[in-house]
């Protein structure tokens, strides 16, 4: 009887639900590394990232019943970032927020355009503006915020063509409106915000005024 009792104590636990995770959030260090993610299921399951991600990878795209996957992530030299792991099994879906802390605080971020105003000819122009930043690993995520002192046009007439660590390239379209026009532009970056936030924290460069003649 004692032997039977001992055997029953070491029986493998079988998860009796379709899909479960230990939590909804996982905070990662800025230094890079890997972590195991436990998955609980009584059936087949799949997992995928919610967006293309060049700083993290997973070692599998699915499994059978309970198990785990390995999530590898690179050093974060910039601001906070995240990717969502989406798990599916049967009619169930669960998500895991993989949030990586920032190495550079917002107070230490530098985004400075070396210009205060631009006079653009009516025929338009493409120009490069010197740019100073320490967010060299966030360049591809930067975008242009445009405000108009007067009436907002149907289509933006200033386009951000590229962002490099020492310059940005702006393209100003030809002016066929029959009147002079102006706009205020600044470079913008939004990070992942807080770990449990649905919106990121946004920082801006200084503002440049663009005035285009007739």
Image (cartoon, rainbow, N blue to C red):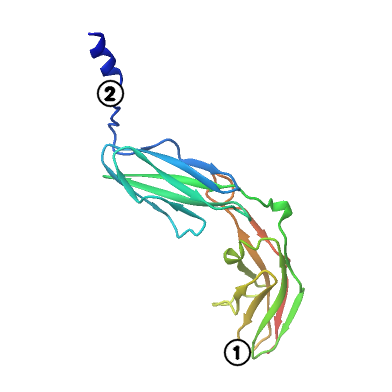
Who's the residue at 26% across and 9% down the image?
Answer: 2
Q: CA distance from mark 1 to mark 2?
A: 79 Å
Kindly give the residue lying farthest to the front in the view shown: 3
Q: Nearer the viewer, mark 1 or mark 2?
A: 2
Q: Residue at x 60, y 84 (%)?
A: 173
Q: Residues within 10 Å of mark 2 (few under 14, many from 20)?
A: few
Against 72, residue 209 (above or below) is: below
Between 147 and 36, the residue placed more toward the observer is: 36
Q: Is residue 60 above or below residue 16?
A: below
Q: Which mark is on residue 176?
A: 1
Furthest residue in direction top, as rendered: 1
User: Split into 4 quadrants, where in the image is the C terminus?
Assistant: bottom right
Quarter of the image where one finds residue 121: bottom right
**Where's the N terminus, which quadrant?**
top left
- Snapshot quadrant of residue 22: top left
Query: Along the line of sight, which residue is nearer the eye, 75 or 18?
Result: 75
* Percent of width and height locating residue 189: 62, 61
Q: Residue at x 52, y 49 (%)?
A: 198
Please tell me how crowded label 1 is: few (under 14), some (14-19), or many (20+) other residues with Cα within 10 Å. Answer: few
The residue closer to the viewer here, 138 or 194, is 138
Secondary structure under tag 1 reads loop
* Local SS, label 2: loop
Q: Position of residue 149 (x, y in %)?
A: 68, 72
Q: Is residue 100 left or right of residue 7?
A: right
Q: What mark, if any, has residue 11 been given in the picture?
A: 2
In the drawing, what numbered circle is on residue 41? none
Height in image: 61 above or below 3?
below
State how many labels appear.
2
- Residue that appears at 30% across and 31% down: 15
Proximity of marks 1 and 2: CB atoms separated by less than 8 Å? no
User: Camera-side residue: 200 or 183?
Assistant: 200
Query: Which one is earlier in the sequence, the residue at label 1 or at label 2?
Result: 2
């Amino acid at each position: 009887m004692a032997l039977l009792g001992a055997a029953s104590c070491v029986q493998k636990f079988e998860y009796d639900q379709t899909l479960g995770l230990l939590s909804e959030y996982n905070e990662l260090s800025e230094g890079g590394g890997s972590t195991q993610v436990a998955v609980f299921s009584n059936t087949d399951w799949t997992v995928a990232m919610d967006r293309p991600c060049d700083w993290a990878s997973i070692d599998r795209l699915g499994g059978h019943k309970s198990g785990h996957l390995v999530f590898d992530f690179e050093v974060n030299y910039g601001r906070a970032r995240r990717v969502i792991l989406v798990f599916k099994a049967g009619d169930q879906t669960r998500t895991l927020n993989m949030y990586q802390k920032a190495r550079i605080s917002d107070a230490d971020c530098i985004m400075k355009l070396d210009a205060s105003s631009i006079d653009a000819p009516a025929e338009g122009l493409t120009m490069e503006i010197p740019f100073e930043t320490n967010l060299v690993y966030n360049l591809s995520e930067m975008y242009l915020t445009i405000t108009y002192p007067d009436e907002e046009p149907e289509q933006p007439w200033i386009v951000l063509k590229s962002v490099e660590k020492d310059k940005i390239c702006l393209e100003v379209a030809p002016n066929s409106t029959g009147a002079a026009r102006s706009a205020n532009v600044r470079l913008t970056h939004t990070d992942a915000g807080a770990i449990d936030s649905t919106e990121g924290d946004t920082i801006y460069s200084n503002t440049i005024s663009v005035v285009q003649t007739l």
